[in-house]
Amino acid sequence: MQFDTTERRRRQRLQKAKIAAERLSEKIKELKTREREARAAIRAGAAKHETWHRMALSHPERLAGFDGEMASARMYLSHLTMTEYVHAVAEFDRPDRTKVDVELAAVLANLEEWTRQGDRLVLERARIDYEAECDSFNARRADTTKSDDWRAKRPTLRQGFLIDRIAHYLEIDAPHGLSRGEAADWIGAHGGNLRLRNSAMGD
């Protein structure tokens, strides 16, 4: 009798152990599936992230010798019409030079002037973005159901970029530690509108 009871308990423990092992095996499979899905999502997300695209696209130019100080001049060159582009780089063409090598030589030879032209393009784009952001702010103010909580938030990337560009253009120090509302006020106080855009573009 004692033998039967002991054996039965052993068999019960064995059965429970088998069930637990099966459940654990299924759990492991589920976790591995989740891991694969998470890794796939990370890869997909990285491939689509704007920063990834920018780094990937700029890599050949960086290898060719371009640096961040040439960004504005490079932007100016990329905004020329094809006729203007050919005229701008023609004298730097050599049989042993690639397209990016020719562009680098042209940028280096015209760095100061093209940087000024590129800065104007950047400032114009930033001001257009700022106008859209102002419209959004004004719409929020006009909506009485909304509060002014946005003013206490951190400045947007566009605001930070525009502040830096305006400070550079006016040759003053850019402020730091501003809230979103304070940044909007600073930009407005320093001509961050389409009226200054005309004078900045030399119209």
Image (cartoon, helix red, strand yellow):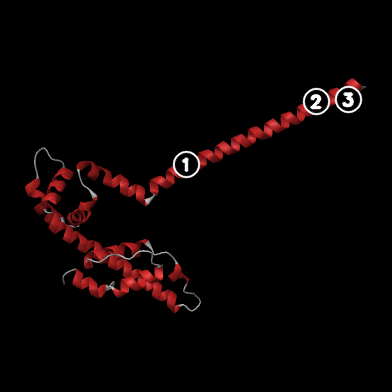
Q: What residue type is labelled 3?
A: Thr
User: Where is 8 relative to 107, above or below?
Assistant: above
- Residue beneath the point at 80% across and 28% down: 12
Circles 2 and 3, Cβ within 8 Å, touching? The answer is no
Vertical arrangement, residue 139 with respect to residue 23, above or below: below
Viewer-proximal residue among 192 and 39: 192
The residue at 8%/41% (across/down) is 94
Marks 1 and 2 in Cβ contact (< 8 Å): no
Dot 1 or dot 3, earlier in sequence: 3
- Separation of marks 1 and 2 at Cα, in angstroms: 43 Å
Mark 1–mark 3 Cα distance, whole angstroms, equals: 52 Å
Question: Pointer 2: what residue?
Answer: 11
Looking at the rendered structure, the kind of residue marked 2 is Arg
- Say which element carries label 2: helix
Identify the residue at the far top of this view.
Answer: 3
Q: Is residue 80 left or right of residue 129?
A: left
Q: Is mark 3 on a helix, strand or loop?
A: helix
Give the residue pinned by disc 3: 5
**x%, y% of residue 2?**
91, 22
What type is the residue that disc 1 sits on?
Ala
Give the labeled residue for mark 1: 40
Q: Residues within 10 Å of mark 2 (few under 14, many from 20)?
A: few
- 16 and 200: which is toward the camera: 200
